[in-house]
Amino acid sequence: MAGLDDRKRQVLRAIVDDYIHTAEPVGSRTVARKYNLGVSPATIRNEMADLEFMGYLEQPHTSAGRIPSDKGYRFYVDTLVGSQADPDLDQEGVRQVLAFKAQRMEGVVRQAAHLLGEATEFLGVASQPAGTEESIVALQVVPLRGPEAVIVLVADTGSVRTKMIQFPHTPSARDVEAIGQALSQRLRGMRLGELGSSGREIARELGQFGVVLDQVLQLLGERSSGGERLLVDGTTNLLQQPEFQDVAKAKRVLHALEREELLAEMLGDVPRGGQGLEVAIGREMQLEEMADCSLVTAVYAAPGGVLGRVGVLGPRRMDYRRVMRLVEGVAQAVTNALGAEAQAPQLTRLEDTELRAEPSAIPGRRGRRRGGEPRQNRERPAGS
Amino acid sequence: MAGLDDRKRQVLRAIVDDYIHTAEPVGSRTVARKYNLGVSPATIRNEMADLEFMGYLEQPHTSAGRIPSDKGYRFYVDTLVGSQADPDLDQEGVRQVLAFKAQRMEGVVRQAAHLLGEATEFLGVASQPAGTEESIVALQVVPLRGPEAVIVLVADTGSVRTKMIQFPHTPSARDVEAIGQALSQRLRGMRLGELGSSGREIARELGQFGVVLDQVLQLLGERSSGGERLLVDGTTNLLQQPEFQDVAKAKRVLHALEREELLAEMLGDVPRGGQGLEVAIGREMQLEEMADCSLVTAVYAAPGGVLGRVGVLGPRRMDYRRVMRLVEGVAQAVTNALGAEAQAPQLTRLEDTELRAEPSAIPGRRGRRRGGEPRQNRERPAGS
DNA sequence: GTTAGCACTCTATGCCTATGAGTGCTAACG
DNA sequence: CGTTAGCACTCATAGGCATAGAGTGCTAAC
């Protein structure tokens, strides 16, 4: 369990690098030729045998090359040298795209997921925060024809929620005015999360229209509490990837994605440790269907303190360095676009990692690797 | 080109039916056995040879059975006996689901696409109408922190649009009030489509805040004119279908779908003839990538007269009868959910077809089949 | 500790053949 | 004259088999 000596590291890194780009198991010969470590294939073979024994590599079958295991990827990731700006990511461009979409938070986040999907050719994902922390800035009742009306609620983050309602009978202009006033005064400044409870009592005060408003509040409350929305963008990108040429495989993953709860769990699960950039590799996600995938996410922040994650879900064999930079950059851009002062917890985080891992110092510690003993504390649904 | 005699029809229908369910080319023997036409395989063979010569059938290769051509499907569809309610479609359930989502039009339509995708295991699609016909019921400026504000615009259909804006400097409460008043008075009752033009002059009147509002109006106008949004739901469903076990094929179709313009063209294109239920088979869509697919759509209406289409895109081999009923039912449900009086143009339409085609009368006319001379009047982009 | 050599394993590929579904044609039948 | 039976022919598909090639593990030499 002790650290890897220097050559083993080199070999492991070479294998991961190669596999990331070719998607083919890599053999000793290839390593010796392409990455000049100054030793012969035979030596590499010995190292590879060791690495396999230690759990960093796997062999699909006897006479194929090796591929990295989750543990191998984990080592690779924890060992990555941190960030110069990614040349693929035109920061200014990202800023502009996001700014343009900044009509609402939903737009920004959605756009971020899209950008990530496009840039990586994997899936862009994002969690739309529940928003229980947002507070109400304005609330208006807009009558339409007859007994129909729309309730518009604006939160301090600029996000807007609306709901069409039916009055029991067509209200007079004054009624509408009164209701609007009452609601507005009572609710302004309140957090969305608090709505459910105190909403009911207000509704009672409103007399005959109480029924309707009760219903509305209930719905708004509902959406803002359980309703952590999940966005996934670029499903078809996955089909580009060689590992998903097998339709069955692709189907399994995509299906898992459709059950939003699962992804939610993943996104909610990953940052167990905390903030910043997080990488979950293969089975580190507690989801059997995702065994061949990895998830890279980073938090974003809005001024109201609302937090969510954007990230990339792709094949386990992904260019972690590049993806991590992209995700980090986009998360930062989202935070900026939402108007929060840059608070960039992720940067420190990454450099932290870098410092610890790179100079091969502190070999005794396992770093902040999440691998360890996976899934002992959470039972998975028995499913396929 | 004259009509088909009775037995040819039976054979053709049998073949389509069978192919729809098995996805395998169907041979003379199968037809003779499963559909008792009272004749021997040899006779069927002769009929099939005729049908192929007339263009209703195709042969993947010499020694496979036959499959229907576009023309064959077209005949089948035009000949379908119209609608009893589809048992798969729980009308009441649909109504409830849609009603629940009726917070905004967007929600209803999205939900409709989703339902269709689920029920058919194909793609549910929907066009979100540009909404140039909607008119403005209310408009409010909601200040947030500092120079930020949100513009909220409610249309008579209940749809709500919002945009975050930045004032050149933090405005006073009175400023905001004034702007809101000015805008509201000027714009109320105006159609969204008219915004672009008259908006500018209003902006000028607003003096120092003109710049901002100019920009807002521009954006709202933009979105409501070119911005016919397209929704696609259930991409992964397609992977279930046997014809898309070949990843390459699936990729082509899904890619075509991602270029929204194309789908838009299709949805806009299909109802050339007019309203109601429309079926485009294979190359009847002007899109090479879609040669193996068919599109079934129906219009929905909102009280403001806003129209859009919902439908299903699936393999050319689909159960047209069932799909048509589903689409029709959902479109109707959407219309209801949006509060428009049932105007159901599609029902008459379908019965019309049924009457003409079924009793084998009027053999001389080609019916309203769209096949005929396809794509002579519209050049396709040269694409792949 | 490193390397060369070699036997061994296992997948992928290509070729062949057999199989069988399905056709088209011809001739006989009622 | 329409229908049918029979038969030869076509062609995609599946299985069997040998081959090639990549890669390993082991052993012995350096």
Image (cartoon, coloured by chain):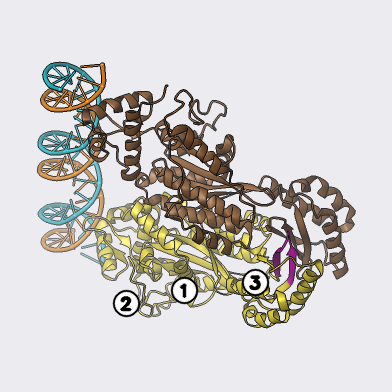
Chain colours: A yellow, B brown, C cyan, D orange
Q: Is residue A143 magenta?
A: yes
In the depicted structure, whether residue A148 falls above or below residue A351: above
Residue that carries the numbered disc 2 in the rendered image: A1
The span from disc 2 to disc 1 (Cα, nearest Å) is 27 Å
Q: Residues within 10 Å of mark 3 (few under 14, many from 20)?
A: some
Q: Is residue B320 magenta?
A: no
> Which amino acid type is marked by label 2?
Met
The span from disc 2 to disc 3 (Cα, nearest Å) is 58 Å
Of the numbered discs 2 and 1, the one sitting upstream in the chain is: 2
User: Which chain does tag 3 point to?
Assistant: A
Q: Position of residue A332 (x, y in %)?
A: 61, 65
Where disc 3 sits, the SS reads: helix
Of the numbered discs 1 and 3, the one sitting upstream in the chain is: 3
Instruction: Respond whether the residues carrying marks 1 and 3 are from the same subunit.
Output: yes
**Start and end of the magenta stretch?**
A138-154
> Which amino acid type is marked by label 3?
Val
Q: Residues within 10 Å of mark 2 (few under 14, many from 20)?
A: few
Callout 2–callout 3 Cβ contact below 8 Å:
no
Q: Quadrant of residue B63?
A: top left
Residue displayed at 26% across by 59% down: A60
